[in-house]
Amino acid sequence: MKKFFDDIKKDMKFKSAGPGKKLAEESSSRPQVVQSSSSAKHHRHAPTEGAQMAGAAALARIGQQQRPKVHTSQDAIRNQVKKELEAEAALLAENEKADAAEESKVPVKDFACLSVSGVYFTCPLTGATLTKSEREVHIKEAILMRFEEDDVEASVMMIHTFNKDREKVKAAVDIISKYVENICKNPTEEKYRKIKLSNKVFQDKVRCVEGSREFLQALEFISVMLPVEGQEEEEEFLVLPEQSPDALELMKERKDRLQRGEPVRAQLDRQPQAFRASANAMRFELPPEFYNLTAEELKKEQQQRSDLVEKNAMLRTKAMREKEEQRERKKYNYTLLRIRLPDGNLLQGTFYAWDRLPVLFGFVRESLVDGWQPFELIAPGGQKLQESEEVALAECNLVPAALLSFAWDAAVQADIAAAGGKRPALLKPALLETIQTLS
């Protein structure tokens, strides 16, 4: 009896060891996947006809979702662009946070100690004041809002602003202009009023330029599916209904607007500010935006300033000095300039490093009550600046900041005084109302 039970136990152990293997087979270290008893009990059946149809429908829906949706209406296109702008704005905000975190590693003075809080821009369409990271998205949104007022103007702005490649823009403008010219010369010829969207020239030169389709739709082209000879499927065309003579003249005028179009760019806010006479007039503390450097590069520059003293002590040729000065000037995007007036007060403004001298003279003139009178600006070192010279501020060594001196033209003032005239007034009241004291 005992032997009988021992045989049963051996048999159970043998069965629980799993399926056997041939001696010639390689043993695998990978564990076997054991199917659960519950799944072993259920046998899969072939799907019913209804299940197969439902599955096919689901696959078809997934396939449609994966294909890029083609928008044909202006509203749909604008909505799509708006979604892209929102995503772009979110990405810019994220990048701005990362930049701020990186800049926080640079030893920058306290905000209250800065000579200017930052670099700002003004949107020419809305008048809003923007930071550098906000300007592109804001301008795009402002242009899209213009479609409600003037779809021709908005689409022209869109073509010239949304596309960075100026050569592609010019090619698209030339082709669209040719469309209009052919229609105006042959107003009754239907072939000139139809644009096949699959046409290679349209695909390569026009469709790839944002705003081109919106402009054609502003000219009253409409999207139509038409049969094509030799093809079973219809294709999409942009078709212009026959136009009256007045409508043709209007098309010519709109074509001219397209050709004259310019990119919409945010304008640098010069942040004009008056200061009382101060011994700190030559003291400048600039925010990182003034430098054409990354935060890490700016940090290295600050750490290596002591080396510049040694370099200046070395004997260098004039060519070597000029080359190094030119390289230094390229480090700056903007410059902060102060002009000391005859009464001791200061006028401050922000400029691009590549702004020309006439821009600086224009800024000073607009800030004066009697700006029509001739005056002179003297740079550090006694160099007299010439308004007529188209020289960049960086080339005059006026970057990243400088203090200049202002003087009325002596000969003109002598003539005014001899005639019994009054001394010219200086800053406009609006600037004097907000005058501050330099810390």
Image (cartoon, helix red, strand yellow):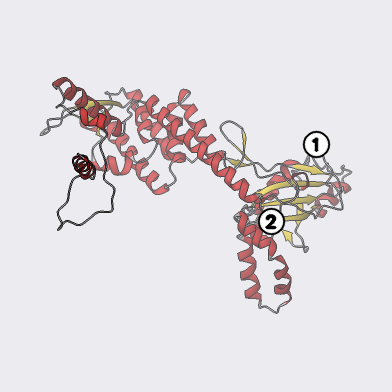
Outermost residue on the top side: it is 50
Task: Tell me the CA gap for discs 2 and 1.
Answer: 25 Å
- At a point 27% along the width and 35% down the height, the residue shown is 182
Q: Residues within 10 Å of mark 1 (few under 14, many from 20)?
A: few
Outermost residue on the front side: it is 1
Say whether disc 2 or disc 1 marks the residue closer to the N-terminus: 2
Name the quadrant containing residue 27.
Answer: bottom left
Q: Can you give x and y, in whole percent of width and height, for residue 402 in the image?
A: 74, 56
Nearer the observer, 79 or 129:
79
- At a point 67% along the width and 78% down the height, the residue shown is 316
- At a point 63% along the width and 61% down the height, the residue shown is 329
Q: Which mark is residue 137?
A: none
Residue position for label 1: 434
Q: Which mark is residue 400?
A: 2
Q: Can you give x and y, in whole percent of width and height, for residue 113 in the image?
A: 78, 47
Q: Secondary structure at mark 2?
A: loop
Question: With 83 as the anchor, is 344 left or right in this view?
Answer: right
**Which quarter of the rendered picture does the N terminus lie within?**
top left
Tag 2: residue type?
Pro
